[in-house]
Image: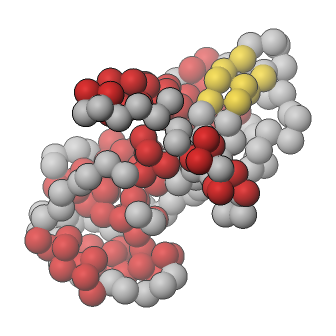
Amino acid sequence: MNIDFHYGVVYIVARLGGLPCEEALTVAHACQYVDGATTPGILRFAGGETFERFATAHKLFDYSNAENDQNRLVWTPFHFLPADVKEALRDLMRTNTSIDELQRLDSVCAAVRAGAIPGLKESIPGYIAKGPGSWKCEATGLVSDDDAGERPPWSMAFERSDYRRFHDAVKEHRFVVTQEILPAYGLRIA
């Protein structure tokens, strides 16, 4: 899936499911961030604190995409789980066929503004993937795609951040999928 579905449609489904706007935005952002979290490893803070992150995606021209050992912990737990959507969303996705994912997201946003999704009254807020205004930047002050060797100061704001919560959820999700769900069906990938 791409940004039109990960962000736009997930926001719609979250709102239709009864979540308040801010919570639906967090869910949609986290869903899209699955395709944006490309920096794995330890985040090192200036005071010596550390935080472990897992990548849930590869960068566009990342040659580790060709290595199955690298792919097994990125693609399997985060990109191939089934989902169900309502008929209005199926129709929207069937007609939204641009090859440009941002144009598809614009089409999803336009459909929402036009009232094509019953029960949703507000527009879908903009998505900030990386750099200033992103979850990572708000939590750490880092603006680069990777950490570029920087060590931000640790703060309680980091502990309360959606960036930290996202990565904690990623760790739990990857563990449950690769160590509990798949083995229960005779599949072992880790």
Image spot of residue 50 (x, y percent): 72, 17
In the picture as drawn, the residue positioned furthest to the top comes out as 48
Q: Quadrant of the N terminus?
A: bottom left
Return the residue nearer the eye: 54 or 73. 73
Give the residue at x 51% y 82%.
Answer: 100
Colour mapping used in the image: secondary structure
Give the residue at x 64% y 55%.
Answer: 65
Image spot of residue 88 (x, y percent): 14, 73
Image: 7 above or below 155:
below
Picture quadrant of residue 181 = top left
User: Is 95 placed left or right of 41 in the picture?
Assistant: left
Image: 110 above or below 7:
below
User: Is 2 placed left or right of 142 in the picture?
Assistant: left
Image spot of residue 96 (x, y percent): 33, 84
Total marks in image: 0
Return the residue nearer the eye: 109 or 99. 99
Picture quadrant of residue 26 = top left
Give the residue at x 45% y 66%.
Answer: 2
Give the residue at x 41% y 31%.
Answer: 188
Image spot of residue 164 (x, y percent): 55, 28
In the picture as drawn, the residue positioned furthest to the front comes out as 186
State whether residue 113 appears in this view.
no
Return the residue nearer the eye: 122 or 71. 71
Picture quadrant of residue 89 = bottom left
Image: 91 above or below 177:
below
